[in-house]
Image: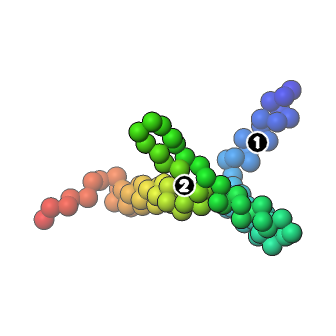
Amino acid sequence: MVEKIFITPFQKFAKMESLSGILLFAATIIAFIWANSPFQDAYHALWQYRVGFISENFTLNKPLILWINDGLMAIFFFLIGLELKFLLLKLTGGKQINKTN
């Protein structure tokens, strides 16, 4: 019963191709409203919250905005590169492209 009520609708929603666009649009609207509300100080404080790793010999402690700008954008462009490689292989019929002439 739990599967029919919760899991099956979630699986259908997760399989939608437009899921990422819907989530990105919703997050953008929420951030826009939050940044322009009376709670904007909390919004800006969130971006300056320090996140990191600390050990005896190594400290990596940066604001959240830098983790997002550097780390997540690197992951994003890595995934874009993988997608382009997949599409190029698909267009060439799965054959490897000969780089030497």
* Residue 60 placement, left or right of 4: left
* Secondary-structure class at tag 1: helix
According to the picture, the residue beneath numbered tag 2 turns out to be 62
Q: Residue furthest top?
A: 1
Mark 1 or mark 2: whose residue is earlier in sequence: 1
Would you place residue 17 above or below residue 39 in this image? above
- Mark 1 or mark 2, whichever is nearer to me: 2
In the rendered structure, which amino acid carries the disc numbered 2?
A: Lys
Is any part of residue 26 visible from this angle? no
| Residue shown at 81% from the left, 73% from the top | 36
* Secondary-structure class at tag 2: strand
Point out residue 38 in the picture as x, y percentages from the top left corner.
Answer: 86, 69
Foreground residue, 22 or 9? 22
Measure how far apart labels 1 and 2 are at the Cα level.
35 Å
| Residue shown at 77% from the left, 37% from the top | 8
Point out residue 90 in the picture as x, y percentages from the top left corner.
Answer: 40, 56
Q: Residues within 10 Å of mark 1 (few under 14, many from 20)?
A: few
Is any part of residue 77 visible from this angle? yes
According to the picture, the residue beneath numbered tag 1 turns out to be 10
Q: Quadrant of the N terminus?
A: top right
Res 25 → quadrant: bottom right
Res 2 → quadrant: top right
Point out residue 30 in the picture as x, y percentages from the top left corner.
Answer: 78, 63
In the rendered structure, which amino acid carries the disc numbered 1?
A: Phe
| Residue shown at 38% from the left, 57% from the top | 85
Q: Quadrant of the C terminus?
A: bottom left
* Residue 55 placement, left or right of 94: right
| Residue shown at 41% from the left, 39% from the top | 57
Point out residue 94 in the picture as x, y percentages from the top left corner.
Answer: 34, 52
* Residue 87 placement, left or right of 16: left
